[in-house]
Image (cartoon, rainbow, N blue to C red):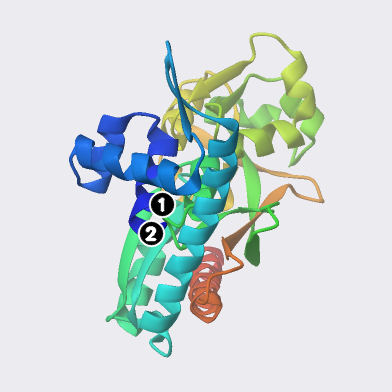
Amino acid sequence: MITLRQLRYFEALTRHLHFGRAAVECAVSQPALSMQIQELETELGVQLLERRREGLALSVEGQEIARRARRILREVQDLGDFAKLSGAGLAGEMTLGVIPSVAPYLLPLVLPALRQRYGAMKLRLRETMTRTLLEELTHGRVDVVLLALPVEHPDFESLALFEDRFLLAVPAADAASWPAEIDPEEVSRQRLLLLEEGHCLRDQALTYCARATAEDGQIFGTSSLSTIVQMVANGFGVTLLPEMSIPVEIRDGRVALARFREPQPSRTIGLGWRRSSPRKRDFMELGRIIAEVQRDAAAKALS
């Protein structure tokens, strides 16, 4: 009989394609994991893995069984969540994934509110880029993700929470040369500083300032908004900043901000989760709190 243990071991092996690393993740010895994989192959009557010169690879049958195994494991996890958390609301455990261009600006406001209202909830946080978060959401390693929408995946459901507008950060010494309202073509004539590849904020900036990609040598890559702001302060170029980041990132008199002309560019921040999850009510409540906290922070910034 196929066991959940075998499926878990196999799922870990499909990600690592290395018996040793998969065994470490599963907290078992390598021989024990290898034996379970062999028993799974015997039970199914197919070869799941191919040993090649460059390392392990999934067979054609193994790829399809891996896809089905992940679905089974997700559904088992969701079943357990339903039984364990039914009626518990935000008093249970939850793993929240957050993208880097949101986490340092929103979490310091949201976490105290959650602790005050739902002190019994055990919240785990995972901060990484969108692609990784969605993969981990698929595999059940995070319960819900806070990111820029849309999330185009048939297995996911999402909830839009608020709009986060973009502003242009420029060296203060050059601020007088910019118009009161910025046109995207003005940005295309400047050195546009961007996050490294993989960050959705980079893609959003290039989408809005599309002509900037045509100027060879004008696009830079870095790993954090704080680094980009310092580059702007030192006259290396300009960048788009999310409005939520302004209170944290703009504390330097050498950086000035300018608005874009209407319609101002923005991103939609929201939550995403697996459609099969029984915790939609919890995620909706989490979203309500996040939206409320952000709305209060925005109102405070205007006052």
Q: As shown in the figure, which amino acid type bears the numbered disc 2?
A: Leu
Asked if residue 154 can be seen in this view, the reply is yes
From what the image shows, is residue 37 above or below residue 160? above
Choose between 63 and 104: the one closer to the eye: 63
Q: Position of residue 93 (x, y in %)?
A: 33, 72
Q: Position of residue 62 (x, y in %)?
A: 53, 37
Label 2 CA crowd tier, 10 Å (few <14, some 14–19, many 20+): few
Q: Residue furthest left?
A: 29
Report helix, strand or loop for mark 2.
Answer: helix
Q: Are marks 1 and 2 in contact (CB under 8 Å)?
A: yes
From what the image shows, is residue 282 above or below residue 180? below
Q: As shown in the figure, which amino acid type bears the numbered disc 1?
A: Leu
Return the residue at label 1.
7
Q: Is residue 72 left or right of residue 161?
A: left
Q: Disc 1 versus disc 2: distance between alpha carbons?
A: 5 Å
Asked if residue 240 can be seen in this view, the reply is no
Return the residue at label 2.
4
Choose between 256 and 100: the one closer to the eye: 100
* Quadrant containing the N terminus in the rendered view: bottom left
